Amino acid sequence: MKGCQSSSDSTFAQTLKAGGRDAITFGIAFIFLYLSIGMVGAAQALTLSQTMATTLLIFSTPLQFLLIQNYNDGWLLLPIILALNARFVLLSATLAPYLKQTSTRKTLASLILLTPSIFTACITRFKHKTSFPFAYFVGVGAPIFALSIICTYVGFIAGADFASPTVAAAMTMLLPLQFTALAGKHWPHYMEVSSYWLGFIGAPLLVLLFKDYSLLITPFVIGGMLVMIENTRTRQGTATQ
Amino acid sequence: MTLWMLIGFAAITAFAFRALPFAFKNTTALARTDGSFYRFVSYSAQAMLGVIIYDTAFARLDGPSLMQQFQILDALKLLLLVGTFAVVARTRKILPGFFASLLIYVLAFAYLNN
């Protein structure tokens, strides 16, 4: 059995295929998310090309919703766009060591695929299997990206036919449920799980302190605090031995 | 500022932020995944997801405002998020917990707003 397992992970194509299989699990919410992005784009009187461009060029659900729903705010959106995009630095920095053997050209060409869901799929796998990381990244990311493009188009064409308060309520819970399910995949890596829930619990409290910069500052406060706790525990463990 | 300019700005900055860390992929700080810096980045990434989820589910309300406006649907949201996490952690499967929670929420919303 073990022999079968190791040989099934031994080639680029097979790892790509494994990524494609996992894309079903990690990407299912994208169907609803991107149908809704298409629908909201149509409802907000964007053109089809503008709505499609947000998926093709940005591929970031919170940012796309922000742009589509608030584009009349113009330049006032710039700092929020920067804040929302800054999170990609964290995702990329976490993934970078696993993709360091991949050529810069390939990495740059595939960067659009980097979203929290695809990131979580990769990190979950790379913690125990590190063969052909780029194949897995593309294997998970490319089908999800393609599906999102199709769903944006379908959502735009279907437009207001699907719109209702219940659908809108479902849309607000899609992303939270999706990300929380992804956080569950990190179990039993306690520090990652703790970081996620501390971010969730800390958000309504630290926003009082950091105001509009909460999304930028809160995660680093929590990340820093947890590393300090972990390092202190390690030092104490070493000292008692 | 036109929507196309906003889309362009968002696309360029998204690409730049996604690409930037790869310029430092061979530095010791990033290469050592058990080092303090890498763990700091990794935990901060998870914490950022937690913040985004709270902001999306509870419309960025601060603590006191949430307590004042707390409704039964908010309690259900919390319950479903914790429940989804527990189910995925236990079963290692995303879809059953995700769909069950979504269905419960939609049914509850439809019932309470009917």
Image (cartoon, grey):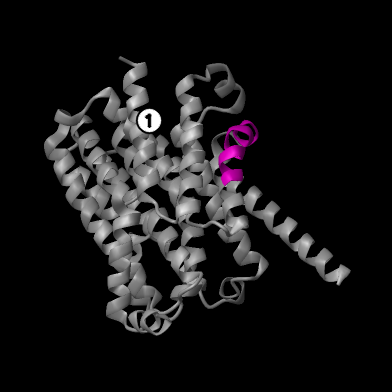
Asked which secondary structure carries label 1, the reply is helix
Q: Main secondary structure of the magenta part?
A: helix
Please tell me which residue is depicted at 42% across the width and 54% down the height of the picture: A116
The correct choice, above or below, for A199 with respect to A143 in the image is: above
Q: Position of residue A235 (x, y in %)?
A: 81, 66
Which residue reaches farthest left?
Answer: A157
Please tell me which residue is depicted at 21% across the width and 52% down the height of the picture: A149
The correct choice, above or below, for B66 with respect to B100 in the image is: above
Label 1 sits on what residue type? Tyr
Give the camera-side residue of A25 and A229.
A25
Q: Residues within 10 Å of mark 1 (few under 14, many from 20)?
A: many
Q: Quadrant of the C terminus of chain A?
A: bottom right
Please tell me which residue is depicted at 33% across the width and 56% down the height of the picture: A25
Label 1 sits on residue: B105
Residue B109 seen anywhere in this rendered image of the structure: yes
| Highlighted range, magenta | A197-209
Give the camera-side residue of A142 and A8.
A8
The correct choice, above or below, for B110 with respect to A171 in the image is: above
Total count of labels: 1
Q: Is residue A208 magenta?
A: yes
Q: Quadrant of the N terminus of chain A?
A: bottom left
